[in-house]
Image (cartoon, rainbow, N blue to C red):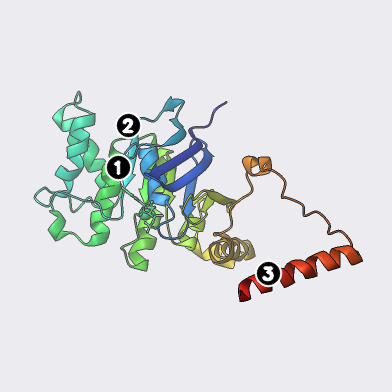
């Protein structure tokens, strides 16, 4: 049976520059997967190809058995900054997408849906505030509500909490996990934060450095859910996982994994053993050196 999200030997190049190569990853329905890797390696490029916002150069991406060729409401995308329309309230910003996707529902139903998701992210009392009246964390909550309200098959998050302070970040991680569990959605998040990856995910995909970045390692994260930070911090396994990821980023991300086609390379050339030097050989090489010197002097 095929996986829910299936990336098969995906590659992306811009002209001669190979950004991502041979990227093969399968994600099961309901899984929460993180991608970590150094800045500029190609994480956003991978996410953008899954979102259908960037064309792939080679390989294939299938979501729920259907080839991804374009963007669509079956994939909700949350970026670092939620890009809300400043003249619309939180409710109207969420309604923008809801009105387009659920155009057959009544106005009242659509409004109730948007209000429901805004309440889930803790903004039940701020429905009528404009982005200028919301904190950065609250704006990102609107971004999450907007993505979840469209009931996507898959949620794609590109460093969604990268601009938040650590307390707000932790709060929003809890909101995200709560909604992911309640709505049984499949999620892929890009993060620079090893602790965030371990707290949220079932697997952490480690990308090698670019150019031609690919998957260098995948770590299974088996802590029971629901997770609590306090419990994780007491678990020696947590420190082993953390060490594993940090070691990858510091020492192994520049190494390329061995691939099948690497094995097809011709064997290295073997030098012919030198013939033992006979008196005649010695004379010939001395003569060659001597005639070379004479030619240079002439
Ligand atoms: N439209 C484009 N044209 C040419 N090169 C591009 C384009 N978009 C991205 N790149 C290059 O692709 C590489 C990967 O970029 P990408 O944004 O995917 O990295 P990233 O891993 O998400 O980095 P960061 O962690 O800093 O967000 C970079 O070298 C970037 O310069
Ligand atoms: Mg990026």
Quadrant for the N terminus in the image:
top right
Q: In this view, does 133 lie above or below 92?
A: below
Task: Name the residue rendered at 25%, 46% in the picture.
Answer: 118
Residue 234 image offset from top left, x and y in percent: 58, 67
Q: Is residue 271 above or below residue 62?
A: below
Mark 3 neighbour class, 10 Å CA radius: few under 14, some 14 to 19, many 20 or more: few
Q: Mark 1 points at which residue?
A: 147
Task: Name the residue rendered at 55%, 66% in the picture.
Answer: 250
Image quadrant where residue 263 sits: top right
In front of the other: 113 or 85: 85
The reply, left or right, for residue 214 in relation to residue 70 is: right
In front of the other: 218 or 185: 218
Q: Could you tell me which secondary element the residue under label 1 belongs to?
A: helix
Check mark 1 vs ligand 2: CB closer than 8 Å? yes or no. Answer: no
Residue 204 image offset from top left, x and y in percent: 53, 52
Work out how far the residue at label 1 is from the one at label 3, CA to CA, in angstroms.
Answer: 78 Å
Work out how far the residue at label 2 is from the one at label 3, CA to CA, in angstroms.
Answer: 69 Å
Task: Name the residue rendered at 69%, 43% in the picture.
Answer: 266
Of labels 1 and 3, earlier in sequence is 1
- Nearest to viewer (mark 2 / mark 1): 2
Q: Which residue lies furthest to the top in this view?
A: 104
Is any part of residue 179 visible from this angle?
A: no
Q: Mark 2 points at which residue?
A: 70
Q: Do the residues labelled 1 and 3 touch (CB within 8 Å)?
A: no
Q: Mark 3 points at which residue?
A: 292
In front of the other: 207 or 245: 207
Check mark 2 vs ligand 1: CB closer than 8 Å? yes or no. Answer: no
In front of the other: 177 or 11: 11
């Amino acid at each position: 049976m095929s996986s829910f999200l299936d990336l098969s030997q995906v590659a992306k190049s811009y002209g001669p520059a190979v950004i991502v190569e041979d990227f093969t990853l399968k994600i099961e329905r309901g899984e929460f997967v993180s991608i970590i890797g150094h800045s500029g390696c190609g994480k956003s490029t991978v996410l953008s190809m899954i979102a259908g916002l960037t064309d792939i150069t080679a390989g294939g991406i299938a979501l729920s058995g259907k080839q991804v060729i374009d963007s669509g409401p079956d994939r909700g995308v949350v970026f670092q900054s939620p890009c809300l329309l400043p003249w619309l309230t939180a409710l109207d910003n969420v309604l923008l997408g809801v009105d387009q996707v659920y155009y057959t529902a009544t106005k009242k139903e659509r409004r109730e849906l948007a209000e429901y998701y805004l309440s889930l992210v803790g903004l039940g009392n701020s429905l009528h505030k404009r982005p200028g009246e919301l904190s950065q964390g609250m704006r990102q909550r609107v971004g999450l509500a907007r993505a979840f309200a469209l009931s996507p098959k898959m949620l794609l998050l590109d460093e969604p909490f990268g601009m938040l302070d650590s307390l707000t970040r932790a709060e929003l991680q809890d909101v995200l996990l709560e909604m992911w569990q309640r709505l049984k959605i499949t999620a892929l998040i890009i993060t620079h934060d090893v602790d965030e990856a371990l707290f949220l995910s079932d697997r952490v995909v480690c990308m090698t450095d670019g150019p031609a970045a690919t998957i260098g390692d995948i770590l299974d994260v088996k802590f029971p859910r629901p997770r609590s930070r306090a419990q994780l911090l007491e678990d020696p396994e947590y420190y082993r996982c953390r060490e594993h990821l940090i070691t990858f980023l510091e020492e192994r991300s520049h190494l390329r994994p061995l691939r099948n086609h690497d094995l097809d390379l011709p064997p290295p050339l073997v030098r012919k053993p030198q013939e033992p030097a006979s008196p005649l050989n010695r004379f010939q090489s001395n003569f060659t050196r001597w005639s070379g010197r004479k030619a240079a002097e002439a």
